[in-house]
Amino acid sequence: MARLLQIPLLLLTTLSLVTQAQENQEVWRKFIDIEQDHAFFPETLQFAIQQYNKDSNDEYLYQMTQLIRAQEQLSRGFEYLVNMELSRTMCTKDVGFDPDDCGLQKDPELYKVINCTFFIFAVPWDRQYELRSSNCTNI
Ligand SMILES: *[C@@H]1O[C@H](CO)[C@@H](O)[C@H](O)[C@H]1NC(C)=O
Ligand SMILES: *[C@@H]1O[C@H](CO)[C@@H](O)[C@H](O)[C@H]1NC(C)=O
């Protein structure tokens, strides 16, 4: 009888662990500062900037011109908190979403630099990248 009871208990425990992980409550290591070339970070950041450009209402693409601070936390995947300066390029969005080959705006009327904080979630080995939030202010 005791053995029969153990099974549902084990199942319940397993289920609640899975649920907790999905809700991202399980943090294995809290935020630490990382360098720009930290493992998995460059491709994650590139994805996030492309996603930001897709989502933005601006006619032009933005490019990172300065990384101010990057932090990484480990949970079910990698969580990144990134503060950076993005600048408006001369490329309009209809050319695609890779701003790296674009020159910065020279027109003083269009020149614009913004200060952004991104929260990114990534499971790089599953090619899963999500820009969970972005908050940019004009500089
Ligand atoms: C950019 O934003 C960060 C985070 O909100 C803030 O700490 C920093 O002072 C800002 N820098 C400028 C130049 O506005
Ligand atoms: C966005 O950043 C500004 C300036 O740092 C801050 O006042 C505001 O609360 C932030 N908004 C969100 C949704 O985090």
Image (cartoon, rainbow, N blue to C red):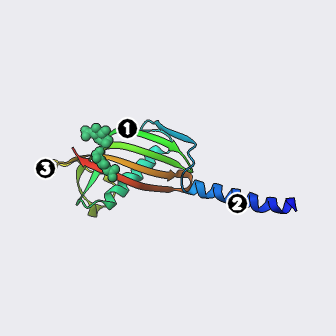
**Secondary element at image label 3:** loop
Question: Type of residue at label 3?
Answer: Asp
Viewer-proximal residue among 12 and 114:
12
Residue 123: horizontal and vertical position, in percent? 53, 52
Furthest residue toward right: 1
| Residue at 45 percent of width and 36 percent of height | 34
Which residue, given by chain and number where applicable, does mark 2 sit on?
A: 12
Residue 17, by quadrant, is bottom right
Residue 20, by quadrant, is bottom right
| Residue at 42 percent of width and 44 percent of height | 81
Which residue, given by chain and number where applicable, does mark 1 sit on?
A: 69
| Residue at 44 percent of width and 40 percent of height | 71
Question: Type of residue at label 1?
Answer: Arg
| Residue at 70 percent of width and 60 percent of height | 12
Q: Nearer the viewer, mark 1 or mark 3?
A: 1
Which mark is first along the chain, 2 or 1? 2
Ligand 2 is within 8 Å of the C-beta of the residue at disc 2: no
**Secondary element at image label 2:** helix
Q: Quadrant of ligand 1?
A: top left
Query: Would residue 132 be found to the left or right of residue 88 on screen?
Result: right
